[in-house]
Image (cartoon, grey):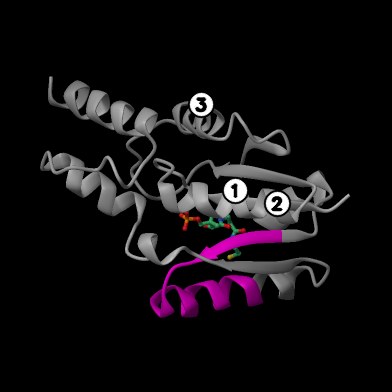
Amino acid sequence: MRVAVCPGSFDPVTNGHVDIIRRGAKIFDKVIVSVLVNSNKKPLFTIEERMALLREVTADLSNVEIDSFHGLLIDYMQRKEARVLLKGLRATSDFEYEMQMASINRHLNDEIETIFVMTNNKYSFLSSSIVKELASYQAPIAELVPPVVEQAIRLKMQENKS
Ligand code: PNS
C-alpha cells in the first residue's frame, strides 16, 4: 500500500492545504495528514482543534487519516510505515527551505522520498499566517479557507478579545 504523510502546523488548514491533500488522495492509497505538536510558533488553535478542522474538511475522503506527531518526522514515518512525504510548493520562495528539509530527511533516512505537488496558482500567495493576519483586521477570508475554518477563526478571535 502506498502511504504518504502530509505534515504541517495546519494552524489552521487553508484551501491551499485542502488542494494538496485532495490531490494526494488521488495519487496515494492512503494520506496521513499529521499535525506537528510542539512547534515553536505560538499557535492560534490547539492540536485537537486543528485536527478536528482537518477531519471536517476531509470528511468525504475515505483514504485520508488525521493524526498528530512530535519529534522527528522521519521517526514518525517509520512508525507509520510510510515512505513518502507529501508537500505542497507554492512559489520559488518555498523552494530553498523545502529542498533543505527534503535533503536533511533523506540524509537521515534514504528510504524516505519527498514528493512535491505544485499548489494551484490561485493559492500560491496563501498561508495560515496570512489568513490569521487578514482575520485579525476583519478582512474577508471566505475564499481562502473552508467555511468551518472561517467560522472557527472568527470565534477564536472573539474569544481572544474578551
Ligand atoms: O506547516 P509547516 O510549519 O511549514 O510544517 C513544517 C514541518 C512540520 C513539516 C516541519 O517543521 C517538520 O517536519 N518538523 C518536525 C521535525 C523534523 O523532523 N525536522 C526535520 C529535520 S531538522
Q: Nearer the viewer, residue 120 or 65?
A: 120
Q: Is 26 in front, or is 10?
A: 26
Please, is residue 53 above or below residue 30 in the view? Answer: above
Q: In whole angstroms, how far apart are the C-alphas of marks 2 and 1?
A: 7 Å
Mark 1 vs mark 3, CA separation in Å: 17 Å
What kind of element bears circle 1? helix
| Numbered tag placed on residue 22 in the rendering | 1
Image location of residue 126, percent across then percent down: 34, 58
Amino acid at dot 2: Lys
- Residue type at tag 3: Ala
Q: Are the residues tagged 2 and 1 within 8 Å (C-beta)? A: yes
Q: Secondary structure at mark 3?
A: helix
Q: Are marks 2 and 3 in contact (CB under 8 Å)?
A: no
Q: Which residue in the structure is indicated by mark 3?
A: 52
Q: Few, some or many C-alpha atoms within 10 Å of disc 1 (few <14, some 14-19, many ≥20)?
A: some
Q: Position of residue 37 (x, y in %)?
A: 53, 41
Question: Residue 94 or 69: which is nearer the viewer?
Answer: 94
Magenta region includes residue 99: yes
Dot 3 alpha-carbon crowd within 10 angstroms: few under 14, some 14 to 19, many 20 or more: few
Q: Nearer the viewer, mark 2 or mark 3?
A: 2
**Residue 135 pos. (x, y %):** 19, 41
Q: Quadrant of the C terminus?
A: top left
Q: Residue at x 51, y 33 (%)?
A: 57
Mark 2 highlights which residue?
Answer: 26
> Closer to the observer: label 1 or label 3?
1
Q: Please tell me whether residue 93 is drawn above or below residue 156 in the rendered image.
A: below
Q: What is the total number of numbered labels drawn onto the structure image?
A: 3
